[in-house]
Image (cartoon, rainbow, N blue to C red):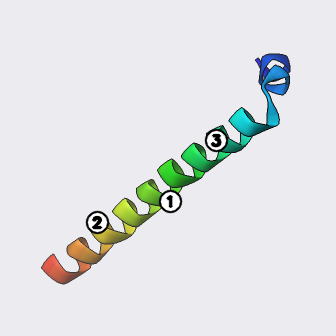
Amino acid sequence: MFKRFNKLSSKSKRIIGIIMGLIVSCVVIFVIILELIRIYAG
């Protein structure tokens, strides 16, 4: 799997990195919002 990833062009690698970063930041923001809601509700 890692070898196949290395075969990708640098452009698609960058696009995959951007998508992964967006997903991770969305999850982090979602978790923070849930924690804030739990603090304010409780």
Quadrant housing the N terminus: top right
> How many other residues sit within 10 Å of disc 1, few (<14), some (14-19) or many (≥20)?
few
Task: Using the image as rendered, state which of residue 19 and residue 35 is in the foreground.
Answer: 19
3 or 1: tag closer to the N-terminus = 3
Q: Which residue type does callout 2 highlight? A: Leu
- Residue at image coords 55%, 44%: 19
Q: Which residue type does callout 1 highlight? A: Ser
- Residue at image coords 80%, 29%: 9
Query: Separation of disc 3 and disc 1 at Cα?
Result: 15 Å
**Residue 34 appears left or right of 19:** left
In which image quadrant can residue 16 be found?
top right
In which image quadrant can residue 40 be found?
bottom left
2 or 1: tag closer to the N-terminus = 1
* SS for dot 2: helix
Task: Using the image as rendered, state which of residue 21 and residue 36 is in the foreground.
Answer: 21
Is residue 42 among what the camera can see? no
In which image quadrant can residue 10 be found?
top right
Q: Position of residue 6 (x, y in %)?
A: 85, 26
Q: Name the residue tied to disc 1.
A: 25
Mark 2 or 1: the one toward you: 1
Q: Name the residue tied to disc 3.
A: 15
Mark 3 or 1: the one toward you: 3
Q: Position of residue 3 (x, y in %)?
A: 85, 18
Q: Name the residue tied to disc 2.
A: 34
